[in-house]
Every structure is written in structure tokens, then in C-alpha cells.
Image (cartoon, helix red, strand yellow):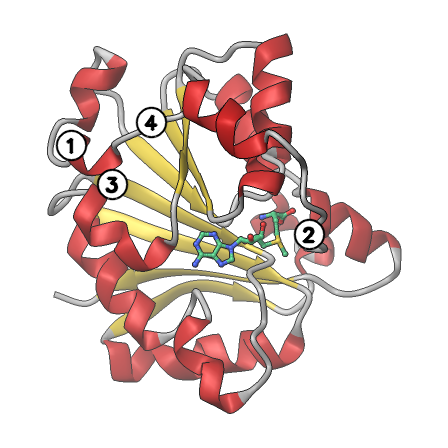
Amino acid sequence: MRLRNVSGSREAIARSRFVIQNPTEKKNHWKELFCNSHPIQIEIGMGKGRFIMDMARLHPEINYIGIEKYSSVLIRGIQKMEKEELPNLYFIRMDAEEITDVFGEGEVDKIYLNFSDPWPKDRHAKRRLPSREFLNRYRAILSKEGNLEFKTDNQALFSFALEELEPAGWHLEQVTYDLHSDKNMMEGNVMTEYEERFSSMGNPIYKYIIFPSE
Ligand code: SAM
């Protein structure tokens, strides 16, 4: 995502009631925030929030948390929430590296990674959100039946993500190399901003659904 500094975004985020300001304080207490016991699903690297807002609107029976590292991007999601408040959605501005400080064991029922940054240089592999380092963090917060869904149009990143599964102790539940032609996996698909952009250019979309082994 190209980053243009949006002046005042940090301050607006610090004031926003849609953003959890001290997320580590909510660890093991996220259900209290939503005042219900609905499942909690998170998107890591939500960008401007199109996907997670569409999901929250479609599924009021699920609680959503969108995580984004950069204020200049997150602010766009906040502006949309100001126009259309969704009671089952909150945002966190943070680096996902700290995810285990924010969610307790088994607190998250599903993780979405959509069009994660590829970090093409080998020395940056650990920063890739589907890397084994991140998979270990995700395992620590996922519930027993929890799983993770990853979509991308980046072939190299998808190959890397598949190779990381075995060493990290995860299993494939479903995989497709052309999501938009896969009737089964397209059922209920909600497009992300990047997905719309890249699929309209003719790029195939890769997707897997994975779960951690015991
Ligand atoms: N998910 C959106 C979509 O599919 O349209 C946005 C995709 S964009 C390419 C990736 C987003 O992930 C960027 O907004 C970036 O700032 C965010 N991101 C990358 N690394 C992150 C990290 N470690 N923690 C939180 N967000 C991250």
C-alpha cells in the first residue's frame, strides 16, 4: 500500500472511539468489550477496512477486530465508521508482531490475511505475515477450532506461505490457485480492496485455509 502521510491521523486515531487505545489491557477480556459471547475474528493488515467492514455488516453474529500498522491507512477506516457505525467492529493500530500481547490463548476464532505485503527480500522473510514466525504467534491466540484464511495475487508469497506450513506445524484445509473460478471456495467470498484491483487486471487470486496441528 502506498503511504501518503495524512496529517492529523495519529491524533484522530488517539481520539477515536472506534479504536482500542490500549489493546494489551483487553487481553483475555475481548468478549467483555463486545458485551456478548460471539466469536471473534480479526483481519491483520486491514488497510482502509473495506473487507472487515463488509464482513461486520454481513455477519452481526460475529465480532470483528481490524488491525493495521499505519495511521495514514487506518484513518480511512475510521472515517468510514464515522459515517456508518458498526457495533461489532473495532480497530487497533499496531504492528502484528505484538499480537500475543493483545490476545490471550484461544481468544481468536479466525484470522484473515488479505494481500499481505510481500517483503520480497530474503532477509525480510520474517516480516511476511504468513511466515513461520507469525504462524507461531497466531497459533498462540487461536481457539481450538480456529483457522486462518489467506488471499493474495502474489505467486512468490503464496509459494512461500505454503512452504511455511509444515515447518510451523500447520495443515491445509483448502487451497485454490484461482479463487474466482473456484465455485466452492468463492461461496460467501467478500472482496478486499486489493482483490478487486488485482482481479480486475486479470491476476488469479490464490487462497488457502489452514489450521494448526495439535
Ligand atoms: N487487506 C487489505 C486489502 O486486501 O485490500 C490491504 C492490503 S495492503 C497490501 C497490506 C496492509 O497490511 C497495509 O495496509 C500494511 O500497512 C498492513 N501491514 C503490513 N504489515 C503489518 C503488520 N506487521 N502489522 C499490521 N499491519 C500490517
Work out whether residue 174 or residue 120 is closer to the camera in this orientation and state it: 120
Q: Amino acid at mark 3?
A: Val
Q: CA distance from mark 4 to mark 2?
A: 22 Å
What residue would you read off at disc 2?
3
Badge 4: few (under 14), some or many (20 or more) residues near its Cα, within 10 Å? some
Left or right, 162 with respect to 187, comes to left
Q: CA distance from mark 1 to mark 2?
A: 29 Å
- Asked whether disc 4 touches disc 2, contact meaning CB atoms under 8 Å apart, the reply is no
What residue would you read off at disc 4?
20
Indicate which disc, 3 or 1, sits on the residue closer to the N terminus. Answer: 1
In the image, residue 48 sits, relative to residue 81, either above or below, namely: below
What residue would you read off at disc 3?
108
Q: Amino acid at mark 2?
A: Leu
Indicate which disc, 1 or 2, sits on the residue closer to the N terminus. Answer: 2
- Which quadrant: the N terminus? bottom right
Q: CA distance from mark 1 to mark 4?
A: 10 Å
Indicate which disc, 3 or 4, sits on the residue closer to the N terminus. Answer: 4
Q: Residue at x 32, y 60 (%)?
A: 97
Q: CA distance from mark 3 to mark 2?
A: 29 Å
Badge 3: few (under 14), some or many (20 or more) residues near its Cα, within 10 Å? many
Q: Which element is circle 2 on? A: loop
- Asked whether disc 3 touches disc 2, contact meaning CB atoms under 8 Å apart, the reply is no
Instruction: Establish whether ligand 1 lies closer than 8 Å to the Cβ of label 2.
Output: yes
Would you say residue 143 is visible in this rendering? no
Work out whether residue 168 or residue 65 is closer to the camera in this orientation and state it: 65
- Which quadrant: the C terminus? bottom left
Number of numbered discs visible in the structure rendering: 4
Indicate which disc, 3 or 2, sits on the residue closer to the N terminus. Answer: 2
What residue would you read off at disc 1?
25
- Asked whether disc 3 touches disc 1, contact meaning CB atoms under 8 Å apart, the reply is no
Q: CA distance from mark 3 to mark 4?
A: 16 Å
Work out whether residue 109 or residue 12 is closer to the camera in this orientation and state it: 12
